[in-house]
Amino acid sequence: MEIRVKTLGRKVKNYMREIKKILLNKKKPSFYAQKGKALLDANQKDEAINVFDKGLSFYPNSVLIHKEYAIHAMDEKNWKNAIHHWDFLYKSKKKKAPAEVYIQLSKALKFDKQEKKSISVLKSGLAKFPGNVKVTLELADLYRKQKDWKKAAELLIRLFEEEENKKLPVKAYMNLSDSYLKLHEFDRAEYVLRLGVEKNPQHKKLLNSYAHIAIQKKNWESAIQRLEYLSNLYEQKIPFSTLVKISMLKQITGNSEQAKNIFNEVLNNYQEEIGQDEEGYRKIILYDNGKSRIEFYKNLKRTNKVVLTFDSLNMVWKNPSFGFKLLLKQGVDVIALRKKKKKTYHQDLSQEEFVNVVNVLAESYKDKIAYGFSLGAYSALYYASNLNCRILALAPRLSIHPVYGKEGSIPKHEFKHNISNNYNEQISPIIVYDPKDRLDNTYVQNELIQKFPNAYLVKVPYGGHGMAPHLLRMGILKEFILSVIDEEIPKYDRKLKSKSPNYCRLLGRTCLRHNKIVWADYLSKRSIRLLPTDKYGIKFRVDVLKTLNQYDEAIALAKKSVKLVPKSLDVRIILIDLYIITEDLITAEKELKLAIKEFRKTPKLSKRINMINEAREEVVNTPLSIFVT
């Protein structure tokens, strides 16, 4: 017992000795914070971490150590660790957290993809520090990141209300103006930038935005004035993009000689910059009514040609304009008529509006060419013929035209264009069309050659209305376009027609209608081999197989095609219809359920529900063959 007491006494003495030793080595919190920071400055990160950890073991509530630890974690992009230490400072009761803590904690949370918590922290910061500029800007940035432009604008405008006589950072003007722009409040946006320019008359980025908003509002003269003022601020080389924009604006307003001189200056003095430019062009939107848009693309090459392009039915302005990449390589400038939505027909744009927007600019070129396909070809003839352009129109058609349109499309849209084209014998538009296509042929014969008596017709039998894809498959679409740019008449090489699935399918359809089954069979096989994903080719091949009573092969083809183009409802319907025809109604219903799950219950699929029900009723009411004598 005595030995045990002695042993215990020694342990207590040793323990107290260790405690005393630790206490003697214990420094003030500032020591650990400053030493850790010094080690970080010397790039001794591991040693710094050890010092911070040791300091927090003594002083777990030290604001100084937590702050330095948090700053280091931010530098290392260790967001979890940064959140831990900033959160301590945020919740600290010993010292009121300054605004910077709210900002840094919100940043760490934002980078850690905890945006809701980040916003909550900044809201608390604003409640504690009303009108704080930095906190307001950070919170507005988060709203802008979420594309909540209204909240961002409402928040930022408070800075101008509360800090009316104080100098705000340029970011406040820029972000508030941009938020108004996103809300399409252009006058408010411009007013805010004007305030910023008055306070910061030498700030180049602010001035550039001020000029850009004038371009967006189509105030060309104001934009020129602002960009020229901006140019004078550069002591050395003016950014070439600024000069290009001035040149474009001068050209738009009819000062073509000045525009040419400025652009030549760019080409002569900025070869290195142009060579490194990734886009190779600059763009200005000339007109935008929310549905139709006219865009001007200035190629960064010397040219005296402009090509007016007109998008086809399914093209939209968020994607490149018709033939843009090819035209850019040819070194020509482009004026493009675009659409916001697919399957719209520019009924919102009159001929007069188009001419007023484009005429002065187009007249600054020695040569102007217009071209398009389908709706684009119709538009080229309808709009650009008034500018006396050279025109390449590939299979012109307006499906909603009350005289020359499609019966199913006409009632669905309001027709606002002139019922007929303007008569023009001064131009010779090149019209490429399929005389075998009833709609296109009627439009060309009854309308276009009456209004353009000197038109040059290029007939492409069995090219179909899909003329551009037909020529593309033949490998001559590019040649057609370039020949027109080079002021030549394109020639149709019929020897290449067999390369086009369009030709095989359309000629094959004619053979099928005339009961030439062998030829139809051959051409349907060739069409599907050339383009196995074409829904029209698949349908044609299935129709041939049905005529040959080869339903098993037709079903096998349809199943294979569904795998090739799983996003095509029409191909899925081909398969369902085959199962209905062959009275395999269980499988038909199974495929129908899969289609509804994929595409929802469209009118076409609803029709198949009725077809299956009717087929089932017919089968049930038909006597079984085993009972028929």
Image: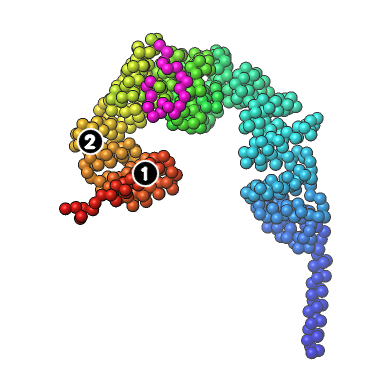
Residue neighbourhood size for the residue with mark 2, other residues' Cα within 10 Å, grouped as few (<14), some (14–19), many (≥20) = many
Q: Position of residue 31 (x, y in %)?
A: 80, 56
Q: Nearer the viewer, residue 198 or 413?
A: 413
Q: What secondary structure characterizes most of the magenta part? A: loop
Q: Quadrant of the N terminus?
A: bottom right
**Quarter assignment of residue 548:** top left
Q: How many marks?
A: 2
Comes first in the chain, label 2 or label 1: 2
Read off the residue under disc 1.
Answer: 610
**Mark 2 residue element:** helix
Residue, x 80% and y 70% (percent of image)?
19
x, y percent for residue 240: 58, 25
480 in the magenta segment: no
x and y percentages locating residue 595 in the rendered image? 40, 46
Q: Is residue 135 above or below residue 195?
A: below
Using the rendered image of the protein, determine whether residue 333 is visible from the camera's viewpoint: no
Circle 2 is placed at which residue position? Answer: 520
Q: Residue furthest bottom?
A: 1
Q: Residue at x 27, y 29 (%)?
A: 497
Whether residue 136 sits left or right of residue 219 in the image: it is right
Q: Which region shows up in magenta? A: 403-423
- Is 279 or 598 nearer to us in this picture? 598
